[in-house]
Amino acid sequence: MSNDGSGGGGGGGGGDAPAIPPNMTIYINNLNEKIKLDELKKSLHAVFSQFGKILEVLAFKTLKHKGQAWVVFEDVQSATEALKRMQGFPFYDKPMRIQYAKTKSDIIAKVDGTFVPRERRKRHDERAERKKREQHHDANQAGTGMNSTYSGAYGAVPPLSQLPYGGGAKSMLPEAPALPNNILFVQNLPHETTPMMLQMLFCQYPGFKEVRMVEAKPGIAFVEYGDEIQSTVAMQGLQGFKITQQNPMLITYAKK
């Protein structure tokens, strides 16, 4: 990605610049510079994917681009909704400042045919894609012949950690759902999920208290609210929410 702003839509401008026409890419600044780049991008994807399909999240290590990011949506409507609803949202303790990006992102340029490839970027992308394919192949190989206990930790079978009894045929029988209460049990989370990502999502709903993740059991979390009415509103709002395209959240009341 070059530093000329063409990768994600130039942004550095302030609020007194001429009005930028609505487009599919939003530019965000005033981001917390202490957050690691990888975590920042994942967290941005987590909080913005509620507004529509995200094609790309861009952020860079360079000094010129610190505290800034670009989120590329599939359509203008999603970008507009995200801009309106997340303006000033406290993200890692700093209010986000959001505007439409000034220049077109590469991914949109590719779609409408105006993209001019940058050779260095192209080579880098090809290397990354090759590495990704190799890792995917290795993961598939490793998955062959796993027993159900091992594969369960990686999402191949539903987590049974909340069941009061151990394995056996009985554990596969459906259980009566827990009665409504103020704590939610969240399953099917991608392994890269952090407590902060979940906090960003669930703190949008009134009464939020805390997120608890179990280190030994990736893919699950508990989220506490002030009362069962507040937890129910959050459950309805985020049921099926995808932090990644492959992982729709499954939210139930926690067993007490």
Image: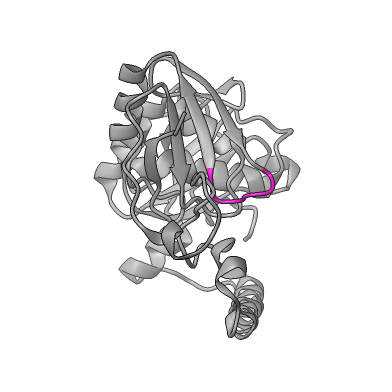
Q: Is residue 225 left or right of residue 150?
A: left
User: Residue 134: x percent and y percent?
Assistant: 64, 83
The answer to whether 242 is drawn above or below residue 230 in the figure is below
Q: Residue at x 41, y 21 (%)?
A: 182
Q: Is 234 covered by the magenta stretch?
A: no
User: Residue 151: x percent and y percent?
Assistant: 57, 69
Residue 156 showing in the rendered view: yes
Q: Nearer the viewer, residue 95 or 192?
A: 192
Residue 89 showing in the rendered view: no
The answer to whether 219 is drawn above or below residue 20 in the figure is below
Q: Residue at x 57, y 63 (%)?
A: 154
Q: Is residue 97 left or right of residue 114?
A: right
Q: How is the image coloured?
A: one colour
Magenta residues, as a range?
215-220
User: Residue 225: x percent and y percent?
Assistant: 45, 19
Q: Residue at x 33, y 29 (%)?
A: 179
Magenta span: chief secondary structure: loop
Q: Quadrant of the N terminus?
A: bottom right
